[in-house]
Image (tube, helix red, strand yellow):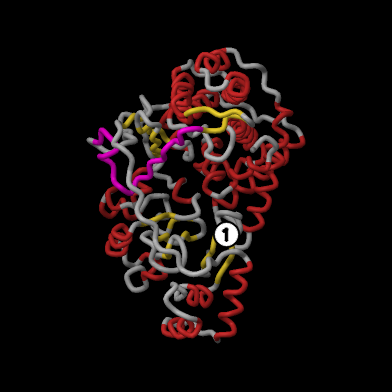
């Protein structure tokens, strides 16, 4: 950030972040499970990180108190075998046209490289971050302190280090899209195995997704690699999420995966709703009263009840609380112009305002209803409306609350920020990316009804 280099340990369970200097990271990088305290100090000295054993013991004790150290060294897990090969079913009619302005490369906490991808990046652009001479500084293990099969490249003032000043990927410009990390190549596609097919849909986490949906371009890219027909054709590094055999619909009510497939097919095939927030709330009531009945879902979408915005006050209050804590943490290590830091602050201010007055709503652009309808359709196609640890009815209301936050978000943003920030072209995508990418989506667990 600016002219200062430092490292951040991010605990995804608690959402807390811990800022480290070069000496602390120099010590921690040698704590790979093969050395005692004397060995760590000796190895750290060789790389220029000088400390006494007492200092190291106190440092590790502080990490242990924070819950960041595991006892002993766990064996590496066996690679999980993929399930049976299934046909790929990408969301019909969608292709992605990237605007090349780098919004998604400025928002996430980590940009992940596999070993061969890191090697390509260092060879192609060795002067970026001095990666040619100092790879250990340019690429940090994604988890822990030793080699783990994936690394994370630093972000510079909130931007991927390989992003240039105008928002273009330097790696892409140097030799094409195939040398970018797999996650960047496949973003924003999500792959979900529902027992019948692997459904593929975009995560609505970039303004380009909604721009592509509302104004399809002939040069748009498919969500699946060229020639791929089944999951067996996909790169083994692509994550395919498997839907569980059963899920919690509401307290005391369970549903099966097969019924969920039919329910979500009905949602995908229904006419686009005029108000997606009302539609999501109506689906939540339908799940509570009729379970995973496709006919009931169709009726709920066709004639949703007026939205009871007051019911969402607890959602807004919980989100404001989470965002407030995230903002305080971000202020300790993120630059003021960092998009992620600003987005968290915008979400906090909007959620707090909605908790006071849930009827707040910025003037609606003509495209909003279509964008929100696409969000609902894409979320149903690849089961993004389903949460692994929330009852389905609660998860549907969570999604409705996100729409309401996105609608009101422009009220807290100045015209200058809108003019200069391409990510604000579609606030819904910014809200979605920030909630998932920075742990704010856990707010839904703080709302009554989450269990």
Most foreground residue, 290 or 385: 290
Most foreground residue, 41 or 250: 250
Where residue 293 appears, as percent x and y from the top left, is 52, 18
Furthest-right residue in view?
Answer: 356
Residue 239 in the magenta stretch? The answer is yes
* Residue under pointer 1: 334
Lateral position of residue 422 relative to residue 146, left or right: right
Q: Is residue 358 above or below residue 263?
A: below
Q: Residue at x 55, y 15 (%)?
A: 296
Where residue 337 appears, as percent x and y from the top left, is 57, 54
Where residue 445 appears, as percent x and y from the top left, is 64, 42
Tell me where the magenta segment starts and ends, as one range. Answer: 228-246
Quadrant (top left/top right/bottom left/bottom right) for the C terminus: top right
The image quarter containing residue 55 is bottom right
Q: Residue at x 53, y 75 (%)?
A: 24
Where residue 147 appears, as percent x and y from the top left, is 38, 66
Q: Residue at x 42, y 60 (%)?
A: 153
Most foreground residue, 42 or 205: 42
* Secondary structure of the residue carrying numbered label 1: loop
Number of numbered discs on residues: 1
Most foreground residue, 27 or 158: 27
Q: Residue at x 50, y 29 (%)?
A: 375
Residue 382 in the magenta stretch? The answer is no
Lateral position of residue 129 relative to residue 289, left or right: left
Lateral position of residue 356 relative to residue 228, left or right: right
The image quarter containing residue 277 is top right
The image quarter containing residue 170 is bottom left
- Crowding near the residue tagged with mark 1, few <14, some 14–19, many ≥20 C-alpha atoms within 10 Å: many
Our reading of the magenta stretch's main secondary structure is loop
């Amino acid at each position: 950030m600016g002219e200062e280099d430092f490292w951040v340990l991010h605990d995804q369970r608690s959402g807390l972040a811990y800022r480290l200097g070069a000496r602390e990271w120099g010590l921690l990088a040698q704590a790979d499970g093969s050395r005692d305290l004397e060995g760590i100090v000796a190895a750290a000295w060789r790389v220029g990180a000088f400390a006494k054993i007492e200092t190291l013991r106190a440092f590790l004790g502080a990490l242990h108190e924070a819950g960041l150290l595991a006892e002993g060294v766990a064996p590496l897990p066996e690679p999980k075998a993929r399930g049976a090969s299934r046909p790929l079913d990408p969301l019909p009619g969608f292709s992605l046209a990237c605007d090349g302005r780098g919004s998604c490369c400025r928002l996430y906490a980590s940009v992940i490289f596999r070993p061969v991808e890191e090697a390509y990046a260092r060879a192609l652009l060795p002067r970026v971050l001095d990666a040619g001479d100092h790879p250990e500084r340019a690429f940090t293990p994604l988890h822990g302190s030793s080699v783990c099969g994936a690394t994370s490249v630093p972000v510079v003032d909130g931007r991927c280090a390989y992003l240039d000043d105008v928002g273009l990927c330097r790696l892409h410009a140097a030799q094409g899209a195939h040398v970018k990390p797999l996650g960047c190549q496949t973003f924003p596609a999500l792959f979900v195995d529902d027992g019948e097919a692997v459904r593929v849909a975009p995560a609505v986490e970039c303004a380009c997704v909604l721009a592509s949906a509302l104004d399809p371009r002939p040069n748009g890219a498919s969500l699946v690699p060229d020639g791929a027909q089944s999951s067996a054709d996909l790169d083994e590094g692509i994550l395919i999420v498997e839907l569980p055999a059963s899920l919690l619909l509401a307290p005391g009510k369970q549903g099966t995966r097969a019924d969920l497939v039919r329910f979500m097919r009905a949602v995908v095939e229904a006419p686009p709703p005029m108000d997606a927030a009302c539609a999501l709330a109506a689906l939540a009531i339908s799940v509570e009263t009729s379970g995973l009945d496709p006919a009931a879902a169709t009726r709920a979408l066709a004639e949703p009840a007026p939205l009871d915005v007051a019911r969402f006050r607890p959602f807004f209050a919980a989100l404001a609380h989470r965002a407030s804590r995230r903002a305080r943490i971000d202020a300790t290590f993120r630059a003021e112009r960092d998009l992620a830091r600003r987005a968290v602050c915008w979400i906090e201010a909007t959620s707090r305002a909605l908790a006071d007055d849930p009827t707040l709503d910025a003037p609606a652009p003509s495209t909003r209803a279509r964008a929100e309808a696409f969000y609902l359709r894409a979320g149903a196609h690849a089961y993004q409306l389903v949460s692994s640890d929330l009852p389905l009815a609660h998860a549907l209301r969570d999604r409705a609350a996100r729409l309401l936050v996105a609608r009101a978000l422009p009220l807290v943003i100045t015209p200058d920020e809108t003019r200069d920030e391409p990510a604000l072209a579609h606030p819904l995508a910014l809200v979605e990316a920030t909630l998932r990418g920075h742990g704010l989506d856990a707010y839904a667990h703080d709302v009554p009804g989450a269990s």
